[in-house]
């Protein structure tokens, strides 16, 4: 097996990277909960989002 393929499918690397991702998400949830800011983006209706894109995105 090619070394790159072996590394990609290495269970310990997957476990370590997975734990880092979970830690990152947990920190984000902790920080958001502490500030009472629960949205990642300001919500807008699909119509408003479409209108914004029509005005600001060149074809």
Image (tube, rainbow, N blue to C red):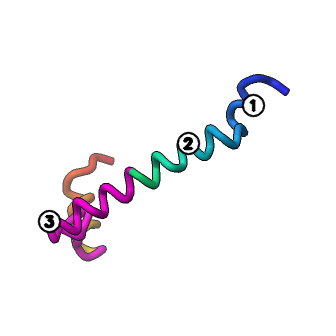
Which contiguous range is marked in magenta? Answer: 24-46
Q: Residues within 10 Å of mark 3 (few under 14, many from 20)?
A: few
Disc with the residue nearer the chain's start (3 vs 1): 1
**What percent of the width, then of the height, locates residue 49?**
26, 67
Name the residue carrying label 3: 35
Label 2 sits on residue = 16
- Give the mark count: 3
Residue sitting at the far top: 3
Residue at 28% x, 46% y is 58
User: On screen, 47 above or below 9?
Assistant: below
The residues bearing labels 3 and 2 have C-alpha atoms spaced at a distance of: 29 Å
Whether tag 3 and tag 2 are in contact, CB under 8 A, the answer is no
For image coordinates 75% across by 23% down, the residue present is 3
> What kind of element bears circle 2?
helix
Q: Position of residue 34 (x, y in %)?
A: 17, 66
Q: Is residue 36 magenta?
A: yes
Q: Are marks 3 and 1 in contact (CB under 8 Å)?
A: no
């Amino acid at each position: 097996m090619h070394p790159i393929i072996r590394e990609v499918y290495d269970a310990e690397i997957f476990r370590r990277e997975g734990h880092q991702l979970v830690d990152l998400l947990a920190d984000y949830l902790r920080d958001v909960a502490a500030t009472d800011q629960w949205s990642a983006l300001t919500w807008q209706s699909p119509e408003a989002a479409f209108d914004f894109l029509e005005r600001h995105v060149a074809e």
